[in-house]
Image: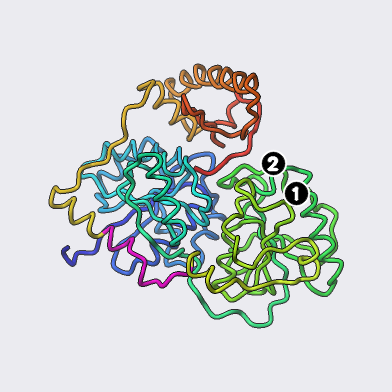
């Protein structure tokens, strides 16, 4: 490799992915990095952007906002060596289609923005044509390699440290109970009401200490996942010491006594800052609750532990396998530099997106499903008109078979995915809850 600094561009849209991309690139000392935000219904607001960039070297002037149609031309003019795709699975696949049009072609890196255990089939399927898939722990690396092998997917994986979970000295004297809210878990309104009542009781039990509900979006803003019932609504009537925060997680943790969550990556951030955690097991420990990663950690606790503020620190053995490996074991940037060198020498074949069943109409569906109303093409609306009845037929077939699976789904045969963007279209009245891919 030459000593020339590599040019790296992260292409993102939603809040958690912008935070991940900014923090990941901030960890690379020998690159000129910038961020492109593609306009989708999930694209961060200016306030969410500031929160996502907080604590990194990136500022507003390092961010370019583009329409999807302008992306390939922009990348061709800017000629980055590396593109880091930071978005949900359907978004990643759409961006890779655009990169197929870019000359010279950059090395393509993809990844997920936080805890990714259990490894999800869709995560690999959507990103299998990337030159490198970034994972963040030894446990993730084993799980994703095993999954890729079972899917017969030739996916190169690179180990990174979780970028916003670098160990740092704990803040002294914090008194807040910080609850990291999530859109996906718990899922039902009834279970979310259980959490809301738990937080009320915790606030009443310690009236001189705050209970802080850390939210990622304000009214009118979108997150990576659709939230069915917001805590702002569930906690309209609350004690004065139960408050909401929209600050960056690092700022919220600065005054924390401990953190409570079901499965948020905020738990890893708290551990990195020396702050104890309760991982709620009130609703069980399961793939559906996205909290199996905490098995063996010693962090699980119930409502009584939350109300009594019985926070705990994780097992040292669990730490080594889960996000706190020796930074010297992280290989992803060495892998990137090697891949760039191979591409410059003509030794790295392009991993192009295959032509899938449905051809141009299917590509139009994929574009429309990601961009929603940002896509105003006739082909997008035509694909929507064809795809929605097909989706209804598949759902009816599933009901007849007694399969009442997830409301946001990827059909095994047609691979038609309903995304948050597509839910905004007037032809689709139901609003299923999204699953990250």
The image's colouring method is rainbow
Q: Residue at x 31, y 56 (%)?
A: 8
Using the image as rendered, state which of residue 115 and residue 361 is in the foreground: 115
Considering every residue shown, the one lying at the far bottom of the view is 172
Q: x, y percentage for residue 423?
A: 59, 31
The CA distance from mark 2 to mark 1 is 10 Å
Looking at the image, is mark 2 or mark 1 earlier in the sequence? 1
Using the image as rendered, state which of residue 227 and residue 292 is in the foreground: 292
Task: Give the residues in magenta.
Answer: 324-336
Picture quarter with the N terminus: bottom left
Q: Is residue 60 magenta?
A: no
Q: Residue at x 63, y 27 (%)?
A: 403
Tag 2 secondary structure: loop
Are there few (<14), some (14-19), or many (20+) residues within 10 Å of tag 2?
some
389 vs 252: above or below: above
Quadrant position of residue 356: top left
Magenta-drawn stretch, dominant element (helix, strand or loop): helix
Are there few (<14), some (14-19), or many (20+) residues within 10 Å of tag 1?
some
Q: Which residue is mark 1?
A: 192
275 vs 421: above or below: below
Q: x, y percentage for residue 114?
A: 51, 57
Quadrant position of residue 91: top left
Q: Which residue is mark 2?
A: 228
358 vs 69: above or below: above
Q: Is residue 328 magenta?
A: yes
Q: x, y percentage for residue 365?
A: 45, 26
Q: Residue 415 bears which disc, if any?
A: none
Q: Are marks 2 and 1 in contact (CB under 8 Å)?
A: yes
């Amino acid at each position: 490799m030459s000593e020339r600094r590599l040019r790296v561009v992260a292409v993102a849209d939603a809040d958690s992915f912008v935070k991940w991309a900014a923090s990941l690139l901030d960890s690379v000392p020998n690159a000129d990095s910038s961020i492109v935000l593609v306009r989708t219904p999930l694209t961060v607001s200016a306030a969410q952007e500031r929160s996502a960039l907080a604590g990194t070297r990136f500022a507003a002037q390092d961010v370019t906002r583009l329409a999807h149609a302008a992306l390939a031309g922009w990348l061709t003019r800017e000629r980055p060596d590396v593109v880091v795709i930071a978005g949900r699975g359907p978004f990643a696949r759409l961006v890779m289609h655009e990169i197929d049009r870019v000359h010279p072609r950059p090395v393509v890196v993809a990844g997920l923005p936080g805890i990714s255990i259990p490894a999800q089939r869709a995560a690999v399927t959507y990103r299998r044509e990337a030159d490198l898939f970034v994972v963040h722990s030894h446990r993730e690396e084993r799980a994703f390699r095993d999954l890729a092998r079972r899917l017969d997917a030739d996916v190169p994986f690179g180990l990174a440290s979780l970028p916003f979970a670098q160990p740092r000295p704990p803040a002294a004297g914090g008194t807040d109970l910080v609850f990291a809210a999530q859109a996906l878990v718990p899922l039902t309104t009834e279970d979310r009401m259980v959490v809301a009542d738990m937080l009320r009781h915790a606030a009443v039990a310690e009236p001189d200490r705050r209970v802080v509900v850390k939210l990622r979006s304000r009214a009118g803003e979108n997150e990576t996942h659709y939230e069915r019932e917001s805590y702002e609504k569930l906690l309209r009537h609350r004690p004065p010491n139960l408050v909401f925060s929209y600050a960056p997680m690092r700022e919220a943790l600065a005054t924390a006594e401990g953190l409570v969550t079901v499965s948020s990556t905020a738990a890893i951030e708290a551990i990195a800052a020396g702050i104890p955690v309760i991982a709620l097991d009130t609703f069980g420990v399961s793939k559906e609750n996205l909290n199996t990663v905490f098995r063996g950690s010693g962090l699980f606790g119930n409502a009584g532990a939350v109300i009594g503020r019985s926070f705990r620190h994780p097992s040292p053995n669990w730490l080594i396998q889960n996000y706190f490996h020796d930074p010297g074991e992280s290989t992803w940037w060495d892998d990137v530099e090697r891949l760039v060198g191979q591409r410059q020498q003509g030794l790295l074949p392009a991993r192009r997106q295959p032509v899938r069943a449905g051809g141009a109409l299917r590509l139009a569906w994929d574009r429309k499903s990601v961009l929603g109303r940002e896509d105003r093409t006739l082909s997008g609306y035509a694909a929507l008109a064809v795809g929605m009845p097909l989706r209804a037929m598949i759902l009816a077939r599933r009901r007849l078979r007694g399969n009442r699976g997830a409301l946001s789904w990827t059909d095994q045969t047609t691979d038609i995915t309903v995304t948050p963007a597509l839910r905004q279209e007037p032809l689709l009245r139901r609003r299923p809850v999204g699953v990250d891919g």
